[in-house]
Amino acid sequence: MTNPLTFLAPPLVGAFIGYMTNYVAIRMLFRPLKPWRLFGIRVPMTPGVIPGKRHELAINIGEMVGEHLLTSKDIKKALGRESFNLELKELINGRVTDILHKDLGPIASLVPKEFTNYFKAGIKILRWRSLKHLHNFINSEAFAEKLSVTISARLQNFMAQETGALLPEETAARLFDFLEKTTTNFLAGPAVEQWLTIYTEKKINEFIKSDQTLSDLIPQSLTETLLDRLQTETPRLIEKFAALLQEPEMRDKITHGICQAISHFIAAMGPMAAFIGNFINPETIEQKIRQYLQEKGDDVADGLFDQATQTKITAIIRQKVESLLHTPASTLLKNLGSEKVEQTAKWLSSSIVALIKDPKTSAALINLLREALAGWQKRTIEETLTPLFGQKALHDGQAKITSEVVEVIRSPMVKRLIDQLAKELLEEKIMVQPIGQLSSFLPHKVQDKIDEYLLQFIKDLLIREVPGLVDSLNIKEVVTQKVDSLDLLRLEGLLLGIMQEQFKYINLFGALLGFIIGLLNLIVLFGPGF
C-alpha cells in the first residue's frame, strides 16, 4: 500500500516553495540596503531593487506628481470649486472680524521690534521731505496765484454780504446801549461842559459881531426845506388861530393884551400920559375891544378861513422869515445894549450846553445812528464802504490784504510754526494715540464691502498667480529630490505601509500556485492510474 505522504509531499512542497519564493522576491525589493561583495566581486541582485534604483524611482515619482497628479490646470480648477470658495470666505470673514474688533495700540506698537528704529527714522525722513515739498510749494508762484484767487474770492463774498450780517440785532442792541451810556457820561462831564461853554460863547459872540446871517449858518437845502414846511403849515396855524378867536377865553386874553399894550404906550409918553389919560379911560377901551370882538370876531375868523387870505398871510410870513434869515446878526441886535447882547450869548451858550448834556440828546443821537444803520443793513458791505473810501481804494485794499497774507505765510516765523505743528501732530499725537477698534470707525456696510473685496481680490490673485507659481516651483524636481533624500528604511516603511496587504496576498497566491504545480507533478509521475 502506498504511503499518503507520497501524494501529499509534492503539493505541500510546491506550496512552500511558491510562498517562500514570493516572500524572498518581495524582500529583495528592499534588501539588502547596500551591495554585497564576495572576494571583491559585487554579488548580483545586491543591493535590492528599490535601494539600487532609488534615483530612477524618485525621478519617476516626481514626473508622475509634477506632470500628471499636481498640474497648474488641476490647481486652477480646484481653486474655482464652490467648497473652496466657501472655506476661503469663512476664513477671510473670521480674520477681518478679528482685526476690526481688536483693540489696536499706537501705530508704532504695530511695527515689529526689530524694525522700530527704521520706522522712527522713516517717520522723521517722511516728515522732513513732506515739509520740504510744502515749503517749496509755498515759495512757488503757483501757490501765490492760487492763494490770491482764493482770498480774492473770499473777500468778494464778504463784500457781497449785507452790512447787517456783521452786526446781529442782539449785538447791535448791546452796542447802542453802550454808546448811549458812554455818550451821556461823556457829554455830562465837567470837561465837556467847560469846553462847550467857552466854545459856544466864543462862536456866538463872533457871529453876533460879524456880518453873517442865519442863512450863512444854515445850509441852503435846509433853509428851503424849513421855508417850504412853514408855508405848508401856516394855513393850518391860521385856521387854528381863527378857531381860537371864537373861544371866550382867547378873546379875554386878546382884550387883556391889547389893553396892556395901550397902557404901556401911554405910560411911555412921559408928561403927555396924564393929559391923554383924561381922555382915554382904560375901562372904556376894554369895553370897546370886547364889543368889537363880539360883533366882528366871527367875521375876522371867517376871513382867516378864506383861502385868499391864508395865501396872503403865508406869503407875508415867508417873506418876513426870509428877510430875517438874510439880515446880519449885528443889524438884528443893534438896538440891544452890549450887556443884553452878552446876556443873550450866555443864555444861548447855556441853553446849548444844557441841551447837549440832556440824556435825551444822547438818546436822540443814538436813535439817529440806529436809524442810519438800519438803512445800511440791507445794503452790501461794498455799497457801504465805496462812498467812504472809493472803488479804487477798496480794490487796492483787497490787493494789499492778499499780498500781506502771502508774505505772512512765507515768513520764516510761520514756516517754523508749521514745522513745529507738524512735529507735534505727527510724533506727539498721531504716533502715540491708540487706534482702538477699527470697527468703531467703519460702518457695517463698509465692513461687508471689505470682506467682499478681499474675497474677490484673493480669489482672483490665487487663480491668476498660483498656477504660475506652481510651474515656477518645479514640483517634479522638488518631489524627485525629496524622494531621493529619504532614508531607505523610512521609504521601505512607507511602501510596506501602503502595500502590506497586497504583499500578503501575493505570498498566498505563490503558495497556491506551488500547490497546483505539485498536483500536476503527481499526475505526470503516476499517470492515469493515479
Image: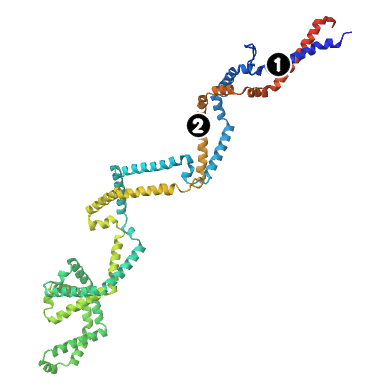
Instruction: Name the foreground residue: 327 vs 37.
Output: 37
Q: Quadrant of the N terminus?
A: top right
Q: Please tell me how crowded label 1 is: few (under 14), some (14-19), or many (20+) other residues with Cα within 10 Å.
A: few
Camera-nearest residue between 24 and 149: 24
Q: Quadrant of residue 125?
A: top left
Above or below, 455 against 265 in this view is: above
Circle 1 or circle 2, nearest the eye: 1
Locate the C terminus and report the quarter of the image it occupies.
top right
The circle on residue 404 is: none
Q: Is residue 54 visible?
A: yes
Q: Amino acid at mark 2?
A: Leu
Query: What element does badge 1 sit on?
Result: helix
Residue 436 position within the rendered picture, expressed as x and y whole percent measured from the top left:
50, 47
Percent of width and height locating residue 515: 78, 13
Residue 50 image point, x, y percent = 63, 18
Whether residue 52 sits left or right of residue 12 in the image: it is: left
Label 1 and label 2: CA atoms lie apart by 53 Å
Write down the residue under mark 2.
461
Mark 2 surroundings within 10 Å by alpha-carbon count, few (fewer than 14), some (14 through 19), many (20 or more): few
Q: Is residue 148 above or below residue 369?
A: above
Please tell me in which quadrant of the rendered image residue 196 appears: bottom left
Left or right position of 368 against 339: right
- Which residue is painted at 38% across and 47% down in the image? 422
Residue assigned mark 1: 24
Q: How many marks?
A: 2
Residue 485: x and y in percent read: 58, 23
User: Which residue lies most toward the left here?
Assistant: 271
Q: Amino acid at mark 1?
A: Val
Q: Which residue is found at the position 76% from the left and 14% from the top?
A: 16
Compared with 110, 318 (above or below) is below
